[in-house]
Amino acid sequence: MRHQLRPTDADRARRIAGDFSLDLLTATVLERRGFRSREELKYFFEQDMIYQHSPFLFEDSFTVVERINAAIEEGERILVFGDRDTDGITATAIMVKELRRLGATDVSYRLPMDDEPYGLTMALVDEVVSKGYTLLITVDNGISAIKEIARLEEEGVDVIVLDHHIAGDEFPPALAILDPKIEGSGYPFSGLAGCMVAFKACYALRFSRTPLYQSRCILLHATLGNDTVRINAVKLENCLETDRMTEEVTIGLFDADGSRILKFLDCNQPIFVLDSSVELKMLNKAFSNTVDISLIDLRAEMEKVMPAVRGRTLFDLSLISKAPVYETGDREIETLVSLFRSFSIYRQKELFEGIDELICLAAIGTVADLMPLRDENRLFVKMGLRRLERNPVDNLRYLLSRLELGSRKLSAKDISFSLAPVINSSGRMGRPDVALEFFLSSDPIRIAELGEALLEMNRKRQRSTEDALDKVRDEASASLSFFLDRMIMIEGGVPRGLTGSIASRFLSEFKKPVLVLAGMDDGRISASMRTAKGFDARAFLDNFSHLFQDFGGHSCAAGFSMDAANLDRFKAELTAFVLSADSDLSTPCEDILVDAEIGVQYFDSRLWRLKEAFEPFGQENEPLRFYSSSAVVNEVYQNRNGGSFLRCSIRVGDDIYPAVWWDNDKEEGYFAAGDRVEMVFTPDVNYWKGMEKKQLVITAMEKLG
């Protein structure tokens, strides 16, 4: 068995351990996984919305806010248009819920139904115009609808695009676009799902209705040095830092004309400090009592809502605050900025009313759409999972209960394998409106009706998937042979709504990229592609984009629609491309990457605490993998249900752990009690009938000696 430790920088790991008060194993795994910068570590540790990126970093966010607020105020007809998958459905639900909460009196929604294509079409444009909508908001789509949006703008319909797909060479002529993948969008993280972009727009709308919107101020703190006064000042707008200045003023040698800090402060903005009397003494020393600066003292108001501030100086607070650890600036000014932002934001009840439900929907859509669980995605998925566990709204509580997920700790895997497929099934069966209405309903009877309809659609989808798999399995094998064991293409026999499911199942079975095409009644071809790591599905399809009407997706999941007249040409170009490749299209890693080699002394609760610290797992944050050569097979259990998995128990030292190896490639009877083994494994928790038990999930195992 070949395994390889993820590369690491030992000195950097030790620095992380010291800076964040961590044990060396945790710090080493963090460093190996790329959680190295203070920004990345902030999102690894925290689960408070105060740490999110401001939506006002989007260049067009102010236009979005002003136009939607105007539409609400004037009672305009608003249409929210989404997509049929889980991301699109949750994005639509988030937007519609928020518009209604904010007072929109005429807001409707629309999703692609039955065999309607993804994205805006001219038919939908005609529908929008004929029904008198004056504002169209696209969520999880729109970035490629150049002609359609141009036509809407000509007809006097304003369009706001909230998308996360990669744009082409041309942008649609929309009134405003929020898309983190657009170069120059201003947003610092490109990995948002469509539902998260919708959430960001909604949060910006909430913010715009508070006194903080368009507010500007300066935060100031001065400290005494050796014959100097160090003055730190930070400018904020919409609670977002826009500029900062530090100046060291030598006492008794103040030069007003050459002072940079005075120019910085002279901008007619309020200057806030924690203790005005202390700060004025420092400023008078620095400026030799020649400058009159008006300061606004925050202490009294802060102490009303933040008990930790009482009786503590800014220096004292900087020693207990987490905020400075994530920044590189002066600890005390960073503490003041963090305190002020928290104090200002959490005073605004408008920002938090009903927001837990939106966070839960955003978390579900983010995980379902295979977004990277890094940066603020990790923050929101953590928050969403905890809220789903503790206090879900009625519709989500109903679905979690029916899926037997309502009485235990939830993971991102529970969303991926249980919750998202049920929601997704409605779109695959041509009725995404059922899932959307389920999320929008507040009537318990209607919630139950729609919930049961979703579960039945999921059962039907599962049956349809199995039937379709059986019909095209021979074609899949023949295709794999034709393409020299490099990929699979299924040309027909699969319903439109099942292309993604079939592609995923064959990817799991054959471990090769899979492309599944389905014919449509309107003379188009729709297709889904699924790939494993080392193969970028979207980049692959880009080679044939000149033949597509529309295409998009991510590295592991992509798709396109195409005029059926182009099918023969597409197949010819695809075949030539694949067969002319130098080798296998994918780039699998022969060695199993592991996070650490674990000795007997580490086989205790620390491993499971480490697992909890790294959750949620998902894209770009896979479950932890450890290597051990200190294990012994304790017992092997007979596999009565067939299938290629092994159940056994493993003894390490004096402890025995149940273990399961799902993709076991060994013959039955290969392992026996007493065998010394080396293994790569993941610490896990198995939930069964309300009970939880620690277990090992084995990735690979070999006998020793």
Image: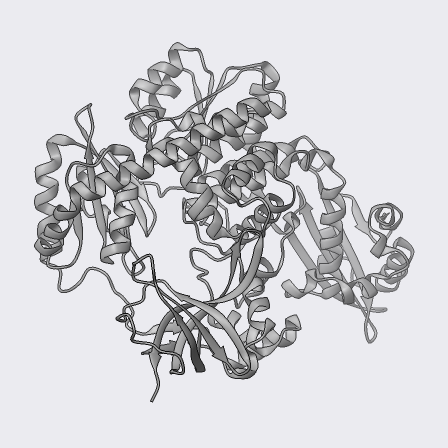
The residue located at (40%, 74%) in the rendering is: 680
Indicate how the structure is coloured in the image: one colour
The x, y position of residue 359, in whole percent, is 58, 41
- Which residue sits at x=31%, y=74%? 591
Q: Quadrant of residue 174?
A: top left
Q: How many marks?
A: 0
**Is there any visible trace of residue 426 in the rendered image?**
yes
Which residue is drawn at the image coordinates 44% and 41% (left, top)? Answer: 420
Is residue 195 placed above or below 51 in the rendered structure? above
Query: Residue 489: x percent and y percent?
Result: 16, 47
Instruction: Please name the residue shown 50% across and 71% down the image.
Output: 657
In this picture, residue 691 sits left or right of residue 50:
left
640 lies left or right of 545: right
- Between 266 and 643, the one lying in front of the other is 643
Q: Residue 260, located in which quarter of the rendered image? A: bottom right
Looking at the rendering, which quadrant does residue 578 occupy? bottom left
